[in-house]
Image (spheres, rainbow, N blue to C red):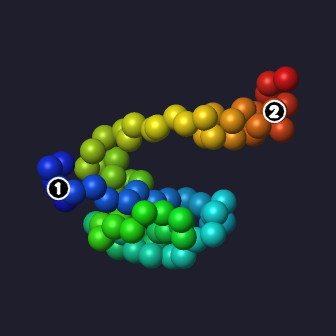
Amino acid sequence: MKKDDDTGLVCMRVADMPIPSAASVIGRCDECDERIWIAHTSPRTDKRFCVACAKAMYGKPKMEVTKRSLAEAVDYLRRKGQIV
């Protein structure tokens, strides 16, 4: 996959995350054929890649910070006792 191709779905490898946090099915990375978790709520796409292949192809991914993701991060840190 080259950078000018259509977008693909980047998923966690089963080896890196044995138990996913969302309802998921196991699929295969289109690049390395590694087993990956594909969330039921993820957008439908023809191309699916593991994080390692995506980083190798595109470098460090940029994360979109939303109000929900920020709230989840703050709640996580509060439960861990790292912030009050």
Separation of residues labelled 2 and 1 (CA atoms): 41 Å
Picture residue at 29% right of the left edge, 49% below the top: 56
Q: Is residue 4 left or right of residue 34?
A: left
Picture residue at 38% right of the left edge, 41% below the top: 61
Judged from the image, the secondary structure of the residue bearing numbered disc 1 is loop
- Mark 1: few/some/many CA within 10 Å (<14, 14-19, 20+): few
Q: Is residue 43 visible?
A: yes
Q: Position of residue 65 (x, y in %)?
A: 52, 34
Q: Position of residue 70 (x, y in %)?
A: 63, 34
Amino acid type of the residue tagged 2 in the rendering: Arg
Say which residue label 2 marks. Answer: 78
Q: Is residue 19 left or right of residue 64?
A: right
| Residue 78 position by quadrant | top right
Which mark, residue 5?
Answer: 1
Q: Is residue 50 visible?
A: no
Q: Is residue 75 left or right of residue 42?
A: right
Q: Please tell me which of labels 2 and 1 falls first in the chain.
A: 1
